[in-house]
Image: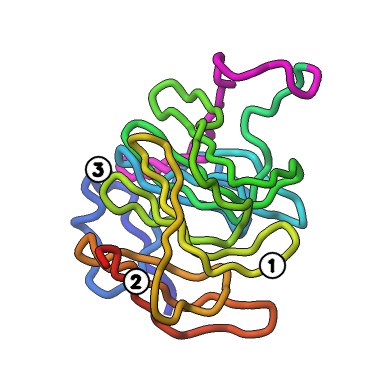
Amino acid sequence: MGAEEIKKDMDITSWPSDLAYEQWVALPVSGARPSARYKHAAAVANEKLYITGGSRNGRYLSDIQAFDLRSLTWSSLKLEIDPSADKSEDSGLQEVLPGISDHSMIKWENKLLLLGGHSKKSSDAMIVHFINLETHVCGVMETSGKIPVARGGHSVTLVGSKLIVFGGEDRSRKLLNDVHVLDLQTMTWSVVEATQTPPAPRFDHSAAVHSERYLLIFGGCSHSIFFNDLHVLDLHT
């Protein structure tokens, strides 16, 4: 069965209400579509779906694409370097946003926060990039505390004003199952010392929060195993 395409003469702003129940629909998308990719990150903000980075043919991508959920139009965002950034590094040559893959992205206030991921530019500690959605300025957030080791394939879950980071794979391909918290109001990292049996170290899993209290971890993989187990971390206890 082929997908049914929404009629071109419909009111484009009302497409969500015109969708058929339990049926795949091909939307009349316009604009230059992003190149094919995987291990990218996505987040919805201000009625737009933002896509950043990813991998393609073994290359890390550094672009940011926006899909307007009202007009169904793709566009590419041109970012600017944070004017307050230190320009002394790399002889003044700076990338606005480095090519990055297997990272996580979360909307916070008027920014998109990109956490971790793999890139050519190595770092021992996890880097938090930001993209200001109003000015399109991009830079690195300064954080303090017990900063996690750099990694990719981890999960990042927003709980209130805190980001919960679990697992992933570090630069030496070591698998992780640690839990870290980034307080977005103070930009301070802390480590969660969880009790009971933790999930086996893994990357590329899924995470979600229930009732602002329970962190759910499902699936993922190691270097030899695919998981289909479900774990729950009580964030209160």
Q: Earlier in the sequence, mark 1 or mark 2?
A: 1
Badge 2 density bin: few <14, some 14–19, many ≥20, Cα 10 Å: some
Kindly identify which residue carries mark 1: 174
On the rendered structure, is 149 left or right of 119? left
Q: Amino acid at mark 3?
A: Thr
224 w.r.t. 124: above or below = below
Quadrant position of the N terminus in the picture: bottom left
Task: Kindly state the secondary structure of the residue where label 1 is placed.
Answer: loop
Q: Position of residue 202 (x, y in %)?
A: 57, 73
Residue furthest right as drawn: 91
Query: At x 41% / y 73%, what residue is drawn?
Result: 217
Q: Amino acid at mark 2?
A: Leu
Q: Are marks 2 and 3 in contact (CB under 8 Å)?
A: no
The Cα–Cα distance between marks 2 and 3, rounded to whole angstroms, is 40 Å
Q: Position of residue 26 (x, y in %)?
A: 40, 61
Q: Earlier in the sequence, mark 1 or mark 3?
A: 3
Tag shown at residue 13: 3
The Cα–Cα distance between marks 1 and 2, rounded to whole angstroms, is 22 Å
Q: Amino acid at mark 1?
A: Lys
The span picked out in magenta is 65-91
Task: Kindly state the secondary structure of the residue where label 3 is placed.
Answer: helix
59 w.r.t. 205: above or below = above
Quadrant position of the C terminus in the picture: bottom left
